[in-house]
Image (spheres, rainbow, N blue to C red):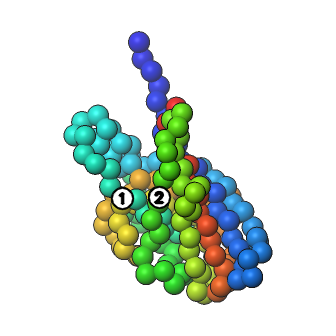
Amino acid sequence: MIFDIHAATYYRVECYSSTGILKWVEEFPNLVTTEGKNTLLDYTLKTGQASPVWYVGLKNTGSAAAADTMASHALWTENTTYSDATRRTFTPGAISAGSVDNSASKAQFNINGTTTIYGAFLTSNSTKGGTTGLLYGVGDFATSRAVVSGDVLNVQITATIT
């Protein structure tokens, strides 16, 4: 008997003004990269290694591909227009019914300039602008979103296996 397993990740990004007013919300699916899928298989079925700590990053324009890695993603770049010294930690809650999210501890970015955000990604490296570590996945907003200094982005990630 063959069973299909599907790994998916969904993002919800909320943008708040410096006065705490919700400016916009963007929800989008994430492309789980080949490296991300291989990591899931390796850590759960092959080696049983402990999962790495994951970090959330912001994405500039450009297309993501399944073959992308942190060292090689030639069609897109990272957006680092935030005052936090590192990428924000992904802190998942309890796993339930094949799903886990960070809704109780969203990744928060403190924007410190005028820029446009195109999406987000999940990596095992906390270095802002870094090109090492594992790239679990990357996704794009339906449309790009403008932010200004003082805005705060809250990123919620939900990972599911069905």
What residue do we see at 46% from left, 30% from top? 5
What residue do we see at 56% from left, 62% from top? 106
Q: Label 1: how many residues lie within 10 Å, few (<14), some (14-19) or many (20+)?
A: few
Label 1: state its secondary structure. Answer: loop
Label 1 to label 2: alpha-carbon separation: 9 Å
Q: Quadrant of residue 72?
A: bottom left
Residue 47 visible somewhere in the drawing: yes
Where is residue 128 drawn, in percent x and y? Answer: 41, 76
Where is residue 156 drawn, in percent x and y? Answer: 59, 58
- What amino acid is at disc 1? Val
What residue do we see at 36% from left, 42% from top? 40
Q: Label 2: how many residues lie within 10 Å, few (<14), some (14-19) or many (20+)?
A: some
Where is residue 144 drawn, in percent x and y? Answer: 67, 68
What residue do we see at 48% from left, 80% from top? 84
Q: Name the disc covering residue 96, or none.
A: none
Q: Is residue 42 left or right of residue 152?
A: left
Label 1 vs 2, first from the N-terminus? 1
**Which residue is at the front of the view, 76 or 96?**
96
Q: Which residue is mark 1?
A: 53
Image height of 127 relative to 10, above or below = below
Q: Name the disc covering residue 91, or none.
A: 2
- What amino acid is at disc 2? Thr
